[in-house]
Amino acid sequence: MDFAKFEEKINIYFKDKSILKQAFTHRSFLNENRGSGLEHNERLEFLGDAVLELVITDHLYQKYPSKPEGELTAFRSALVNAITLSDSASKIGVNDFLLLSKGEAKDTGRARQYILANTFEAIIGAIYVDQGYDKSKEFIASQLFALVDNMVSKGLWIDAKSRFQELAQEKVGITPVYKTIKEMGPDHNKQFTVGLYLAADLVIEGSGKSKQEAEQEAARRALEKNGWQ
């Protein structure tokens, strides 16, 4: 895998090339390549998630001095969710460099979306370790800051759960219920799958790193499925 091509894409050249390779290494790859000497990317993802949240929080705080904390939180959630991050990862060609097991490599659905989002965070973590906060912020700014104006002007940040509940009560007279279907992964990197139900009917599922994130994802998908955006 020629990671120099990825460095060219993002215009960041790593001093420690191994840290960039680690950012792309999924745990499943190591299960099939135990003698590779590589480490998986989950520690970098953990670090990158924190750096991403700080950079986005600071940007929103500076950009919208009159907005209350609640709206800023909603803006941030819309910018750092799995959908936004996986889209950003796809745009810079992350898919072409992932180190995955053969099984994971075949999956192009929602599981791949979360792998892309997590890898995007791991890349941020790798940049932070290799080149520091300012370069990490520069990368995040180049990938995400331009999305803010569009998100705010089109109301894409609006709480999906609240919106779906309002419309479900209006259109079908039922209050939606969310139930956890499964939890996967270690404590520091849990993945929750939640079902959204109208009465006894499962409308759709959503996934996320917390139950709240999974519920929001389910609500967003339900709005899209029903054409209620």
Image (tube, helix red, strand yellow):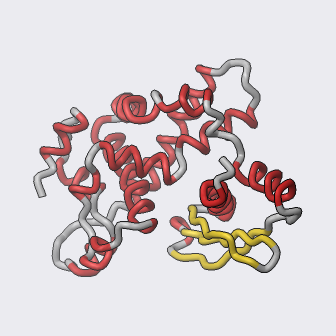
> Looking at the picture, does residue 31 appear above or below residue 157?
below
- Quarter holding the N terminus is bottom left
* Between 90 and 34, the one nearer to me in the picture: 90
Image location (x, y in percent) of residue 111 = 43, 68
> Looking at the picture, does residue 142 appear above or below residue 105?
above
* Between 125 and 95, the one nearer to me in the picture: 95
Quarter assignment of residue 104: bottom left
* Between 114 and 218, the one nearer to me in the picture: 218
Quarter assignment of residue 219: bottom right
Image location (x, y in percent) of residue 184 = 54, 76
Total marks shown come to: 0
Residue lying furthest right? 173
* Between 203 and 211, the one nearer to me in the picture: 203
> Looking at the picture, does residue 198 appear above or below residue 11?
below
Q: Which residue corresponds to the image point at 41% horizontal and 67% vertical from the top-left?
A: 109
Q: Which residue corresponds to the image point at 39% horizontal and 35% vertical from the top-left?
A: 143
Q: Which residue corresponds to the image point at 48% horizontal and 41% vertical from the top-left?
A: 52
Is residue 96 left or right of 221 when viewed as pictured? left
Image location (x, y in percent) of residue 190 = 55, 69
Quarter assignment of residue 39: bottom left
Is residue 78 left or right of 19 when viewed as pictured? right
Is residue 82 left or right of 155 when viewed as pictured? left
> Looking at the picture, does residue 218 appear above or below residue 127?
below
Image location (x, y in percent) of residue 24 = 28, 58
